[in-house]
Image: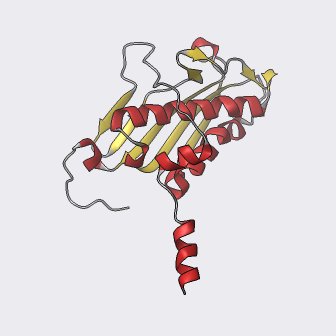
Amino acid sequence: MAAIRSKAVETQPSSPEARLRELGIHLPPPPEALGAYTPVHIVGDLLYTSGVLPTWDGELRGAGVVGRGLTIAEGGAAARLCALNILSLVQSRTGSLDSVRQMVQLVGFVRSASGFVQQAKVLNGASELLVEIFGERGRHTRTALGTDELPMGAAVELSAVVRIFPDVMGLPVIGRAVD
């Protein structure tokens, strides 16, 4: 019986912050707004991000057109970097990724060559990372759209809706949350 209990403890997911450390992932600095908008907005227990690009410390690291010059894997790496930027925004606004109750939705744009129809595969770079860090809490709905241009010539742009634990931000808990 003790072996069963210790096995159960071993399979319990670690906190997202601990999981980042286990995976050796470092978040980039939170991206700044490129215009007259806010990068993060919280309404109730939902955190919304504006669209983020594959940047690190303001430097674009994923430019080009997927299907013409960039492969699906390179587009996926750009999507992964966008997801890291989203996590950086969440962490900077809430203080910890442990505040995430559920990744609710990703909306992604892929700068695509004419006839390229693999946008969903490109965005898997972001989706798989979120599940790797958050486990089941990282599963989300997703929209994958192709476009011919994105800001700064980026290959991918992502935005997210994230459900947070309201008490993390000192927000009043109204009623009882239903999962």
Q: Is the residue 153 above or below the residue 123 in the image?
A: above
Q: Looking at the picture, how far across and down is residue 87, in whole percent?
A: 48, 36
Q: Is the residue 11 above or below the residue 82 in the image?
A: below
Q: Looking at the picture, how far across and down is residue 172, in whole percent?
A: 19, 48
* 179 vs 144, nearest the viewer: 179
- Quadrant of the frame with the N terminus: bottom right
Residue furthest front as drawn = 2
- Which quadrant of the figure has residue 80? top right
Tally the numbered discs.
Answer: 0
* 54 vs 133, nearest the viewer: 133
* 105 vs 20, nearest the viewer: 20
Residue at 27 percent across and 44 percent down: it is 44
* 23 vs 48, nearest the viewer: 23
Q: Looking at the picture, how far across and down is residue 101, in whole percent?
A: 40, 52
- Quadrant of the frame with the C terminus: bottom left
Residue furthest bottom as drawn = 1
Q: Looking at the picture, how far across and down is residue 21, in whole percent?
A: 54, 44
Regarding residue 88, the answer to whether it shows in the image is: yes
Instruction: Locate residue 6 relative to residue 104 in the image: left or right.
Output: right
Instruction: Locate residue 172 relative to residue 112 in the image: left or right.
Output: left
Regarding residue 145, the answer to whether it shows in the image is: no
Name the colouring of the figure.
Answer: secondary structure
Instruction: Locate residue 100 relative to residue 118 in the image: left or right.
Output: left
Residue at 54 percent across and 75 percent down: it is 6
